Amino acid sequence: MERRIILQTARLSVTTWLPADLDDLNRLHSNPATMAFIGGRPETRDESGVRLDQYLDEQATRGWTKWRLESTGGRMVGRAGFGAYAEDRELGYTITQELWGQGLATEVATALVGWHAANPASRLSDAPGTKRLWGYAAIENVASVRVLIKSGLHPVETREHAGRPYAFFRLEPAAPEV
């Protein structure tokens, strides 16, 4: 199994996962600040292993997941991509804490919105066509709310999720050509 590049931005590469990525994923997911809004608590190595197995399965069976994110030097600096949201996709990104505030989440989220538009088949069902793209963030996670807006998603509603208020966003489909 070889690592493939899914997409590149000026400073980042979104790549496929390999089984050998467990320690890197666990470093990311064992940080309490990083996990505050995506699980509420740091993960154990075993929990990260279960998550990595899920990512490996998703990239193999449906062609998309929350992929590995690396800097131009090849170091893993987060994960970004898509989760399932009913029959649609959910945009997700997590950047290592030491790199917060540098615009990396907006950079990768915007690129992933473009990838979603270019790769509309969901594989969650056999129905062809574009699936909607959703994003959500805890309202108190102001930086992530800004990322979703800057990447082109539009606010839809606020509702309770995981015990706190979350803002839900959706990419509005392009108008059909006439």
Image (spheres, helix red, strand yellow):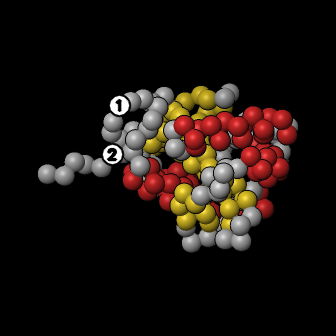
Q: Residue 160, image x and y in percent?
A: 59, 28
- State the SS at label 1: loop
Q: Residue furthest front?
A: 1
Q: Secondary structure at mark 2?
A: loop
Which residue sits at x=45%, y=54%?
115
The answer to which of marks 2 and 1 sits earlier in the sequence is: 1
Q: Position of residue 17 (x, y in %)?
A: 67, 50
Three-letter amino acid code at the position of disc 1: Ala
Q: Is residue 131 visible?
A: yes
Q: Is residue 166 above or below residue 26?
A: above
User: Residue at the spot x=66%, y=36% of the render?
Assistant: 54
Q: Mark 2 packing: few (<14 Cα in 10 Å), some, or many (20+)?
A: few
Q: Which residue is mark 2?
A: 173
Residue drawn at the location 14% of the way across and 51% of the way down: 178
Q: CA distance from mark 2 to mark 1?
A: 17 Å
Q: Which residue is mark 1?
A: 127
Q: Nearer the viewer, residue 157 or 89?
A: 89
